[in-house]
Image: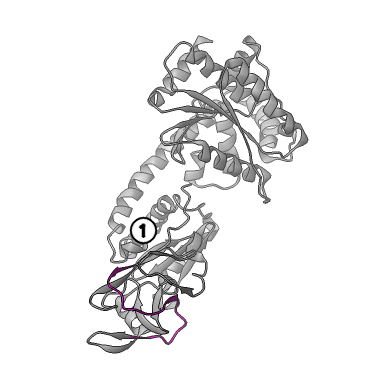
Amino acid sequence: MQTLHNHLLTALAPWRNAPAWHIALSGGLDSTVLLHLLADLAQQHPLPPLHVIHVHHGLQAAADAWPDHCRALCAALHLPLQVVQVQVEAGASVEQQAREARYRAFEQVLQADEVLLTGQHREDQAETLLFRLLRGAGLRGLTAMPGHRPLGRGHLVRPLLEVSRSELLDYARTHSLSWIEDPSNTDTRYSRNFLRHQIFPALAERWSQAATNMARSAGHLSEAQGLLDEVAEQDLGAASTSTEFAWLALPSLALAPLQQLSPARQRNALQYWLSAWTRLPDSRHWVGWDNLRDTGEQGRPIWRLTDGELHRAGGRLWWLSGVWLQPPGSPLDWPDPSQPLLLPGNGTLWFSGILPQGRYEIRYRQGGEVLLQAQRGQRDLKRLLNEWGLPLFARARLPLLYRDGQLQAVANLPGTGEQDWQLHWKPPTSEQRLR
């Protein structure tokens, strides 16, 4: 059994200087063995502080006893346990919704550079590969589970991916460990359980190394995806040009360099870029990209994805999500313009310079506004915004300053306001969540 300890030490060597290790403990076999191994290693080697987290989904009555089981297990090993109860949102897949709730809880626990350790093993890797293959996943999906990846402010590490379930079971029996058998794990209505109990035993009977070989294939696919990611980074480098509207603080790319690529490289670059912001579309929905790329800007093309929208404006692609997809709000009085004004759902506004006296109010465009500009007289606001080239999606959110009922300035618009004062706007930050 010492080889399992050595394997774990080797797998976790890059993370030995982390501020803390958090062990995800479901109470099942895999996480129980991982917990016991780490507690044992901590007695022999200098490791980061160990903390344990149990996520309680509350999806079945039997689960109510699991936190107590985990508390007893951690108490015996003298390790601190945090139990987090989550609400699983309604959805088509209970498995997927529970997973997302679980990882949101993990993200909230992790501090900067801390590590979350989970107990997935070789068979889990093989099951994931087959499951995604049956769903028609592309190469990025077929790479299955990485050994480590960023998670929130820290890192997710799976140190047992090269270990078989039988090895974990042997360890547990040798050390007389007790673990929870989740009743739902035998319910073959769930896709993963069907694969685990119906398909994989048949595969193993015919090909004894099926799980090992499939896990190896996932590694090969991961290497191939890594090469494609390098190509994507090169292609995106040419499209990651500066823009005069960088103050919008929105992810954006120049469209022309992407249009020069083959369709396959376009999709590869966009998959890599969009993966930070949204769940990726399947092959049927990439027609949205074709329409966005090929439609003239007069048509205001938009590609709607799961977690946001991709807009095309000013020769660029812009990613919008969160508050950017909601109306900016109602007019708002500004009783003390010497102090910054927080605009509900629309960022922050402030002045620089000396303001004339008057009653100030912030409004948003309704159409037909006219602005008095120094040395240019009265100008139609729509024409001014066209000259400026501000993307259409930002114009409805652009704060307009009224003094005593008259339009005086437009936030961030060059050449507006008096010579001794200026109106500044910091737009809202998209509620992005790295995926």
Question: On the rendered structure, is 231 left or right of 214?
Answer: left
Name the spot of residue 378 as percent of width and height, x first: 31, 89
| 358 is within the stretch colored magenta | yes
Span shown in magenta:
351-371
- Residue type of the residue flagged with mark 1: Ser
Above or below, 162 against 411 in this view is above
- Toward the right, the furthest residue is 61
At 54% from the left and 10% from the top, the residue drawn is 1
Foreground residue among 156 and 3: 156
- Toward the bottom, the furthest residue is 377
Residue 212 visible from this viewpoint: yes
Colouring rule applied to residues = one colour
Disc 1 residue crowd, few under 14, some 14–19, many 20+, Cα 10 Å: few
**Which structural element holds mark 1?**
loop
Q: Which residue is mark 1?
A: 262
| 277 is within the stretch colored magenta | no
